[in-house]
Image (tube, helix red, strand yellow):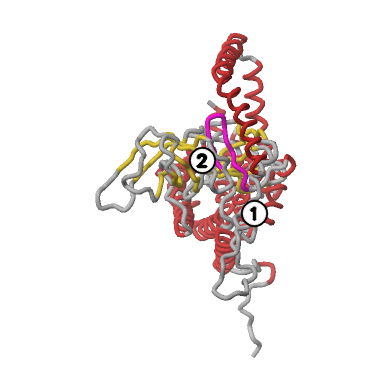
Amino acid sequence: MAQLASFAPARPEEILLPVKPWYVVLTLMVAFLGNLLPLSGVALVVKPDFLALVLLYWCIREPRLISVGIAWCLGLLMDVADGTVLGQHALAYAVLAYAAEYFRRRVLRFPLWQQAAQVAVLLLFCAGLVLLLRVMGGAPLPRWTYAVGPLTGALFWPAATVLLQWPQRPPASPSER
Amino acid sequence: MRHISVEPPPFFHRGPSPLARLAFFGLLSLALLFADSRYHYLENIRRAVGTLLYPLQRVVQLPGEAIAYVGTYFSSQRTLASDNDALKERLLADAPSVQGYSLLEQENARLRALLTVERRFQGAAIAAEVMYSGRDPFTQKLFVDKGDAAGVLAGQAVIDEVGVVGQVTRVFPNMSEVTLVTDKDHAVPVRVERSGVRSVMYGSGTGRLPELRFLSPNAEIQPGDRLVTSGIDGTYPAGLAVAQVVSVERETGQMFARVTCRPLAGVDRSTLVMILGQAAVYAPRPEEPSETDAPRKGRGKRRPS
């Protein structure tokens, strides 16, 4: 039970430790590898864009470390890895990073599941942007399952938040034990 | 009166504003999108970055491969024996046609030698394993584990044990990208096996069946007909199975019949594929006679080889 209780986001009065840059790089790399997983069928449809999710998290929490430029570069890498048109993911991630920077104070005021709803809107907006660009470029409309990925991404948001801020949690003070 | 600076002190300075950065990178990505989709300028960059990413992609595949390996290790002897029996039966069933084929091939070679026609296909076929299917929801692609190093060239045809899967479109040093026949506007020249009617099959994108375009309403075609490659384009060798006709709609008043078909090959299921040797290079098309006597230079259209 104690284990379960500890799997919760930091309380507002908790002051997080400063993040280590290598930790940000490491999480982004793991998310990138997660996107490279050779899945097919239903798993591929349901799989969220892990990199977008982690990127969004760091853009909201650490806008001085990660912002539009880095997001754009990661998007370009993703374009090559997926074999999509160059610039597609790059644009989506840059817009995502900008939106995160714009909305970050507002998003952080809400409890996690309400944050997830806002994240869903952001991710769906980026997916819509990519859809618009590709259809204008002559691609056929994808199936409706195209919208499933962003939604599962939003479902992952609370878990991602708890996991990503884990190393930054201050050690429990003796009075709380 | 001294001027009071309204600029923030340098330790608060954070570079250009987010909106300016977004505008810059947004325009850059639009330029990239345009350059890549219209003119294919950036293949070299893509190739270089793709080569750097290859080790990462292999690492990510290791867990799945390990599970598959353990699975095969523990597959029971009975499964192996029954597989073996089934394969032997199939070999026996195929024997007549295979033997007949070699005879026909010899005869054909002799006839071609008589006619001094080149062999239409050179080079050996390369067996390749499917690494993963493309993650782009707008296209139908497949990535296989043979590339430059194995002698794969862009434009080669890819088949599995049943029929045509697609065509190699990009080659990296150790892997290559195959565009499936179901990809939007991917054209395969086909022939109806039963009646010999020629047409071109166009893919229609994810989740939709390919269709034959420009077939007149009275064309000799019916549901259930098998379509095989006609070999006219020089990319796909003639006679490979491609698809089966699913429906034929002939409406009076329409110029063409609406024919949809289902690909025979396990386009999104097969795990082992064969990359066929490069098509023979055709002689360039003779220059069209011009109105003036002097032939214009460089205007003769060449067939893509």
Mark 2 vs mark 1: give the one in front: 1
The secondary element bearing badge 1 is classed as loop
Residue B198 percent location from the top left of the image: 44, 44
Quadrant of the image for the N terminus of chain B? bottom right
Cα separation, mark 2 vs mark 1, equals 21 Å
Q: Mark 1 lies on which chain?
A: B
Could you say which is closer to the camera, residue A58 or residue A53? Answer: A53
Badge 2, how many Cα within 10 Å: few under 14, some, many 20+? Answer: many
Could you say which is closer to the camera, residue B297 or residue B92? Answer: B297
Seen from this angle, which residue lies furthest left?
B252
Could you say which is closer to the camera, residue A100 or residue B125? Answer: B125
The disc label shown at residue A153, or none: none
Seen from this angle, which residue lies furthest right?
B149
| Residue A106 showing in the rendered view | no
Task: Specify the amino acid type for callout 2.
Answer: Thr
- Left or right of B282 in this view: A157: left
A24 vs B286: above or below? above
Residue B42 percent location from the top left of the image: 64, 59
The disc label shown at residue B229, or none: 2
The secondary element bearing badge 2 is classed as strand
Pointer 1: what residue?
Answer: B283
Q: Give the range drawn in magenta.
A: B155-166
Asked if residue B241 is among those painted magenta in the image, a careful observer would answer no
Residue A104 percent location from the top left of the image: 52, 56
Task: Specify the amino acid type for callout 1.
Answer: Ala
The image quadrant that residue B285 belongs to is bottom right
Q: Mark 2 lies on which chain?
A: B
Residue A85 percent location from the top left of the image: 56, 54
- Left or right of A154 in this view: B7: right
